[in-house]
Amino acid sequence: MLTYIRRRVLLAVPTVVLTSMVVFLMLFLIPGDPASIYIGEQTATPERLAQIRHVMGLDRPIYVQYADFAWHALHGDLGRSLQTSRPVAVEIGTRFPNTLELAAAAMVIAVALGFGLGLVSALHRSTAVDTLSMVVALFGVSVPVFWLALLLIMLFSLRLGWLPATSEPGLRGLVLPAVSLALLSAATLARLMRSSMLEVLRLDYLTTARAKGLRGAIVVFRHALPNAVIPVITAMGLQFGGLLSGAVLTETIFARPGLGKLVVDSIQNKDLPTVQGVILVLALIYVAMNLLVDLSYAFIDPRIRFE
């Protein structure tokens, strides 16, 4: 097990490095000068701009800037925000709990809906229940997140007045963004759960179990579900990583102070250190989630062993 973990961690290093390099290069293609944004357009004299660019290190070659960023990041220093002058690590630490709370709530909703719809659809194949479940799943895959978020705000906030339109502390402020973010993941999990369950239900050992007189619930939940859920767990890990990194639209629409909104604000203000730091942290989370998903297989299916 330890050998497998070490090998996976070593394989993840090039992925994280390549991601940071691509993001670093792409940020230089964004129009605008960070020095001008930092000191303001009205006071941006050529001498002042040159001084600020030198202090920020923007007058150095791009490969030198990246090497400096990578070296400091390796030692836990992600730089300072150009907007607030606070350490980027502090900015991320302040916003990350909000994003984690939103992603966790959305994941709970997605798993409940996805597993429920997929399992019911598989057990009632080619019936009206199956058709209705897959229509709901198709709706979830087809509807854009931002459109669903605006629709939920119009219905439950503006018309019914049940829930707030923007973020507020507590459960009430979490419901609408979590539901709008969860629907796509729920639809994906439902379709995958249905196909995986149907494939497992056709296997010979389940036919033998039924022939021995085992009850339907025991056959489904004790024998079929543990095998059918393995590919779904892979999707769950990827979906959770996607929820953490893909909450940009949801957090922007609901004015939720998370990492997604932090990235949007930082890109608009060309706050390069903050964008680089957030993307690097999200890449590390994604890699860690993939590793945890792979390790979870051994606990779900005892036949799986890592060497």
Image (spheres, grey):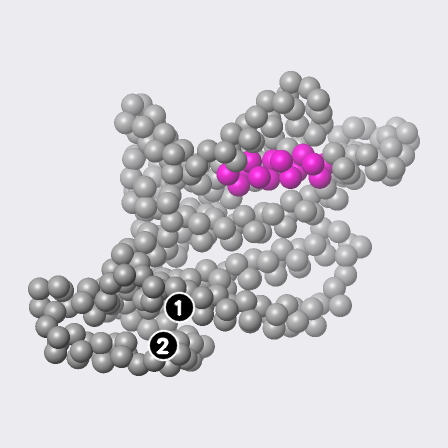
- For image coordinates 48% across by 65% down, the residue present is 19
- For image coordinates 34% across by 64% down, the residue present is 29
Q: Which amino acid type is marked by label 2?
A: Ile
- In the picture, measured across the screen, residue 187 lies left or right of residue 224, that is left
Q: Which amino acid type is marked by label 1?
A: Leu
Q: Against 124, is 36 above or below?
A: below
Residue marked by disc 2: 62
| Badge 1: residue crowd in 10 Å (few <14, some 14–19, many ≥20) | few
Query: Percent from the top left, x then y, of residue 192?
Result: 64, 39
Q: Quadrant of the C terminus?
A: bottom right
Mark before the other along the chain sequence, 1 or 2: 1
From the viewer's side, name the closer residue of 267 and 230. 267
Identify the secondary structure beneath mark 1.
Answer: helix
Q: Against 118, is 127 above or below?
A: above
Range covered by the magenta-colored residues: 184-197
| Badge 2: residue crowd in 10 Å (few <14, some 14–19, many ≥20) | some
From the viewer's side, name the closer residue of 173 and 273. 273
Residue marked by disc 1: 25
Q: Against 54, is 195 above or below?
A: above
Q: Are marks 1 and 2 in contact (CB under 8 Å)?
A: yes
Query: Percent from the top left, x then y, of residue 236?
Result: 58, 47
**Image mark for residue 219:** none
Q: Is residue 81 visible in this depiction of the protein? A: yes
Q: Against 260, is 229 above or below?
A: above
- For image coordinates 54% across by 27% down, the residue present is 136
Residue 189: in magenta span: yes
Q: Is residue 171 visible in this depiction of the protein? A: no
Residue 183: in magenta span: no
- In the picture, measured across the screen, residue 145 lies left or right of residue 82, that is right
From the viewer's side, name the closer residue of 146 and 168. 146
- For image coordinates 86% across by 30% down, the residue present is 210
Identify the secondary structure beneath mark 2.
Answer: helix
